[in-house]
Image (cartoon, rainbow, N blue to C red):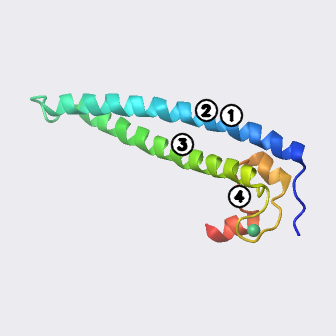
Amino acid sequence: MARALAKSTVERFRKRLEEERAHLEAQIADYEREIEEARMTEASSDRSPDPGNPEASSVKLEYAKELSIEQNSVDLLGKVRHALMRIEAGTYGTCESCGKPIPVERLDALPYATFCVECAARAS
Ligand SMILES: [Zn+2]
């Protein structure tokens, strides 16, 4: 049976994950505001009489970039939330695939990791 992480170690990761969650939520709110602004700028430039307006295409590019950054943050937030749920469930620190303990060094680097290195490599 996998050796469970010490309670103090889990608490340390919980704190890091909660901070990460707060940070990501704030970041996503920011992106959503920026995307909304870009959308409005884009909508107004669509009505512009000059279709070759370089300003409009750079806005479109900026908008796409923001969207993809936002998507990354949303993905990461999902992982962070999932890890916090596993802390609640008492399964944090064990691989979701093989059930082996995830090395603390890996959790230090990626507190939201829920697969051991081997299983993560197999899944990708
Ligand atoms: Zn595994």
Q: Quadrant of ligand 1?
A: bottom right
Depth-wise, is mark 3 or mark 1 nearer the camera? Answer: 1
Mark 3 lies on residue? 73
The number of numbered badges drawn on the structure is 4
The foreground one among 102 and 81 is 81
Residue 106 lies, with reference to residue 34, above or below; the image says below
Looking at the image, do the residues carrying marks 1 and 2 touch, with CB atoms under 8 Å apart?
yes
Give the quarter of the figure containing the C terminus.
Answer: bottom right
Callout 2 amino acid: His
Residue 44 location (% of width, % of height): 19, 28
Labels 4, 3: front one:
4
* Residue lying at 61% horizontally and 32% vertically, measured from the top left: 23
- Gap between marks 1 and 2, in whole Å? 6 Å
Q: Position of residue 78 (x, y in %)?
A: 57, 49
Secondary element under disc 1, as helix, strand or loop, is helix
Give whichever of 88, 18 is nearer the camera: 88
Where's the N terminus, which quadrant?
Answer: bottom right
Label 4, on which residue? 114
Image spot of residue 49 (x, y percent): 9, 29
Contact, mark 4 vs mark 1 (Cβ under 8 Å)? no
Q: Residue at x 71, y 62 (%)?
A: 115
* Residue lying at 64% horizontally and 46% vertically, measured from the top left: 80
